[in-house]
Amino acid sequence: MAMALPDCGPRRKPWINHRSLTSARQSSTRPLDRTQPLLPLAPGIPERRTHDYARHGTTTLFAALDIATGEVIGELHRRHRSAEFLRFLRTIEASVPPELDIHLVMDNYGTHKTPAIRSWFARNPRFHVHFTPTSASWLNQVERWFATLTQSYIRRGTHRSTQQLEQAIRRYLEHHNTDPKPFVWSKSADDILASIERFCLRTSNSRH
């Protein structure tokens, strides 16, 4: 899978003429308006916010993360059908230099497999699609980027309309891409498998 490229060492050379992107969508993102203003951090006092809020519609962020550079291609739509995904694919195509092939890592969401999408991929052979295993979309690095966006920006803000939320997301995208940084795996595949083995040994003989 394209996600393994950062750890491939000498095997990376065949991928020089390729761009590897991990793609997903953050659907039904809600602009939330807290009933009271957020109270900022103070010495000895944590940030505080009300538990209740008002909703103001939803939006969907389609995003593709370049695993080599950390740059993100993003596009906002009010719906997340195959028609919107197709428009996003065309945005990716226009954003990547034409001499490069595109390896796209995605989950198994039905929108990614409609006849219209399959037909488009067949007409655009520079795209090479890789699906994450079922129930394993967390493997997709762009999901980590979504988590950062939500935790450090969206959740801490107050947005009184869908338009305000979309403007905020566009600002975050623009700010992120001024100095993008790729995610770096801190452990090798062998370290991860060894950790899983230790966990299995601890739990396989448990009595609960």
Image (spheres, helix red, strand yellow):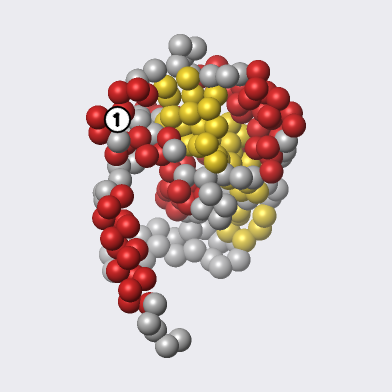
Residue at position x 34%, y 70% in the image: 199
Q: Where on the picture, by quarter, is residue 131?
A: top right
In-front residue for pair 141/135: 135
Q: Where on the picture, by quarter, is residue 123?
A: top right
Left or right: residue 28 versus residue 171 is right
Using the rendered view, name the quadrant where residue 10 is placed.
Answer: top left
The reply, left or right, for residue 107 in relation to residue 70 is right
Label 1 sits on residue: 11
Q: Amino acid at mark 1?
A: Arg
Residue 8 pos. (x, y %): 30, 35
Which residue does the image show at 69% across and 30% down from the upper left?
Answer: 117
Nearest to the observer: residue 131 or residue 38: 131
| Residue in the foreground of this view, choosing between 13 and 158 | 13
Q: Position of residue 3 (x, y in %)?
A: 41, 39
Where does the C terminus fall, quadrant-wise? bottom left
Judged from the image, the secondary structure of the residue bearing numbered disc 1 is helix
Residue 45 visible from this viewpoint: no
* Rendered position, 20 above or below 59: above
Q: Does 109 appear above or below 2?
A: below
Q: Residue at x 43, y 24 (%)?
A: 19
How many dots with numbers?
1
x, y (%) of residue 38? 48, 58
Instruction: Note whether 16 is above or below 191 in the view shown.
Output: above
Q: Nearer the viewer, residue 10 or 111?
A: 10
The x and y percentages for residue 135 are: 56, 55
Query: In the picture, which quadrant includes the N terminus?
Result: top left
Looking at the image, residue 129 lies above or below residue 193 = above
Residue lying farthest to the bottom in this orientation: 207
Q: Is residue 143 visible?
A: yes
Q: Residue at (57%, 44%) from the top-left corner?
A: 107
Q: Residues within 10 Å of mark 1 (few under 14, many from 20)?
A: few
